[in-house]
């Protein structure tokens, strides 16, 4: 009867830490998500050690809860995003996505080469500079009630492009590192698969739902519409991984499809408690992965500072120039929205470590950089968004919650 | 990026299987929960094998999701249960709980001894006949909108008593089996701990909330009341395991405390999506544990039939006579409400197997009996409740969903 008691204690610790962290952050006028990540750092292995490294390893219950949390978050963001709106910003989002990959990749590889790595290793390290983690930005935009702004649409569209390109780029650097050369036909097939999946599912699914969504209420289950779209969310999250994309891309698509239903408002309301329970696991566990011990010397800290500045500047430059057909202030918001690397950089660094390309120190620095960008972005983004809507004379968005 | 893809597929399978099973059951006029358990049997190791035994072992992500599902279910049942109502039925619930433990224990040990086990082993086997699993009955009562009936209050109160006594009994049989003799002082201390925990937390917590619950809305988080009571739920679920009780007892207490807040109706509404997502994991995984292979011979099937009949009859007799101060029809409902053994019998059988007390066959039979009682009860209970409220001239409860 007691087998589950330890995990219950851990769930309690993670959940309560998130609430306390979020409350403190908000009282400091920071987005709640910053507090949740910081709380993870505090209860994690680096500080209090109430969560052990084994408990957050891949495939553990906490890891799965965290994954479900971010999947549901991106689903709910999709639920507030209409396909039509994304289409309107399609061209800008495409340029932002492409530049937001190329500039960090170029700057990252130059930095790595300048630090003594050969070019094939440098390209691998640079790949860890590339992929934006949409979860962090999405949460800030949602907290601020800013998901309907044009900048938000551009960021979300660009995040999809970004994920496709990052996947292709990772394929390329792994091949180059393995000395296999680049199989262009294979890469084009992968690209076609990913783009085809997104286009067919996104456009087709949205069209079906717009045409008729009353069938969602047909089953006997009084909450059948929610159950069906949650099944769609889990299903597309899985399928998108088959196409080499992140699970959250599929979840976002599922949400976008569900946003075309006439049950959309009910679904948005019903998603709220699910987010309250599950997203804290994602952010606390993200924070708990910060390994402070590897960074306990000045040389490492300086290197981390440089890497983080390159990571921020390169994404900002890519995003800013990509979105320059908007006005400069909006382009800055878009640029900062693309900055967080979050867990994707961590995964690439893990690949690099196990392939022997990364040293332990480079690994720790890339992980710390990924998480630092996730910590730094929310306050800046919140500040930019509030200043922007204040000076627009638009109704002030709700106080950061 | 793809580490989580396999688990996403599994979550998808479990969730969709639950929806399909539930829908079919309801079209057959059975409670949805029967379909969810049956769906688990179909996708589980015994049939399709889409879920493997390793995936549902203790401490796996599916096991934890299942545990969280049943914890939230009992929390939400507590949310519809006022302490005052439980107090009114306290005396009946106590007698039902005591007789509902003693009669199955007596009949189970006589059966085991009659089958050639010595008395100390027989007592251990009989312990697996005892503990009611409140999850199944709670779900049926909730599905039928019957939680406010007096029979429901008696069942829930008795389930708490039942859990305390089952814990003590398990302690006794383990000591006897180990040849240690019974340490009465220790048992009394355990009893005092469990009763004290329930009384102090239940009564104290309810009083605090009744006195003032506006502080739940004080934090910046707009859903702070939900977050706080969910934290309370996880916390008390954990603490109750420290007192040797099942986690669901703590969750039920937490719900009962939350039912005294002025946010109770909002909380009930917010719990609905959480139950939609998470309780299917509990019922599908319960069903997937049925091992059909061990029961593929006539002798085993006959023994299973006898054991299941004893398990049902003994609980029914205990519950019926315990509740006889209600009228006979209500006492029958109470008796059947106590019948499901669910996962508690499985856990005791596992203990017995690893202690060498149970043979593989007895183990399989006890597990199958526990799950059969969980399958058989819902339709009977639904039928009894509908017939009862129809003949009372009370408004017909909602169609079984």
Image: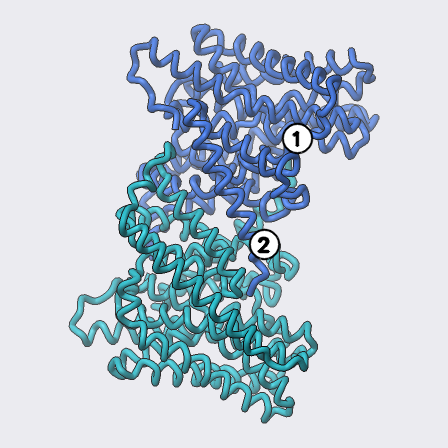
Chain colours: A blue, B cyan
Image position of B357 (left or right of B35)? right
Q: Is residue A62 left or right of B39 when viewed as pictured? A: right
Q: Is residue A21 above or below residue B211?
A: above
State yes or no: discs 1 and 2 in contact (Cβ < 8 Å).
no
Identify the element where label 1 is drawn.
helix
3D distance between C-alphas at marks 1 and 2:
27 Å
Where is residue A121? Give x, y as percent: 79, 21
Which residue, as the protein is rendered here, is positioned at the far left?
A: B393
User: Which quadrant of the view contains residue B378?
Assistant: bottom left
Q: Nearer the viewer's eye, disc 1 or disc 2?
A: 2
- Direction from residue A84 to residue B392 in the image, left or right: left
Q: Secondary structure at mark 2?
A: helix
Q: Which quadrant: the C terminus of chain A?
A: top left
Q: Residue at the spot x=30%, y=67% of the render?
A: B86
Tell me which chain the residue with mark 1 is part of.
A
Q: Which residue is mark 1?
A: A346
Neighbourhood count class around disc 2 (C-alpha, 10 Å): few under 14, some 14–19, many 20 upward:
few
Residue B52 occupies which quadrant of the picture?
bottom right
Seen at 57% across and 12% down, the residue is: A318
Quarter of the figure with the N terminus of chain A: bottom right
Q: Position of residue B183 (x, y in %)?
A: 59, 78
Return the mark for residue A6.
2
- Which numbered disc, 1 or 2, marks the residue that appears first in the sequence? 2
Identify the chain of the residue marked 2, using the numbered disc in the image.
Answer: A
């Amino acid at each position: 009867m007691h087998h589950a008691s330890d995990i219950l204690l851990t769930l309690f610790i993670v959940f309560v830490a998130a609430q306390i962290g979020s409350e403190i952050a908000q009282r400091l006028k920071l987005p709640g998500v910053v507090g949740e990540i910081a709380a993870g750092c505090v209860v994690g292995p680096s500080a209090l050690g109430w969560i052990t490294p084994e408990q957050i390893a891949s495939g553990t219950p906490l890891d799965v809860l965290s994954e479900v949390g971010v999947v549901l978050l991106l689903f709910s963001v999709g639920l507030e995003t209409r396909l039509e709106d994304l289409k309107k910003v399609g061209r800008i989002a495409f340029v932002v996505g492409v530049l937001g990959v190329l500039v960090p990749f170029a700057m990252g590889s130059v930095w790595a080469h300048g630090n003594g790595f050969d070019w094939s290793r440098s390209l691998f390290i640079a790949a860890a500079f590339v992929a934006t983690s949409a979860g962090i930005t999405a949460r800030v935009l949602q907290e601020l009630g800013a998901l309907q702004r044009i900048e938000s649409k551009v960021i979300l569209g660009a995040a999809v492009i970004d994920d496709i390109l990052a996947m292709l780029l990772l394929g390329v650097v792994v091949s180059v590192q393995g000395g296999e050369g680049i199989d262009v036909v294979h890469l084009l097939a992968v690209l076609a698969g990913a783009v085809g999946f997104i286009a067919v599912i996104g456009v087709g699914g949205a069209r079906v739902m717009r045409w008729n969504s009353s069938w969602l209420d047909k089953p006997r289950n009084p909450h059948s519409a929610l159950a069906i779209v949650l099944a769609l969310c889990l299903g597309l999250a899985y399928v998108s991984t088959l196409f080499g994309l992140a699970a959250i891309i599929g979840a976002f698509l599922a949400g976008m499809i569900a946003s075309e239903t006439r049950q959309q408002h009910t679904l948005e309301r019903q998603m709220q408690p699910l987010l309250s329970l599950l997203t804290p696991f994602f952010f606390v566990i993200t924070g708990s992965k910060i390994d402070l011990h590897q960074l306990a010397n000045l040389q490492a800290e300086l290197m981390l500072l440089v890497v983080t500045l390159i990571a921020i500047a390169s994404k900002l430059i890519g995003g800013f120039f990509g979105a320059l057909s908007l006005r400069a202030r909006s382009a800055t918001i878009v640029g900062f929205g693309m900055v967080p690397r979050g867990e994707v950089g961590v995964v690439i660094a893990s690949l690099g470590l196990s392939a022997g390309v990364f040293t332990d120190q480079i690994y720790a620095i890339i992980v710390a950089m990924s998480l630092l960008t996730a910590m730094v972005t929310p306050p800046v983004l919140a500040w930019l968004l509030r200043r922007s809507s204040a000076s627009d004379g638009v109704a002030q968005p709700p106080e950061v919650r």
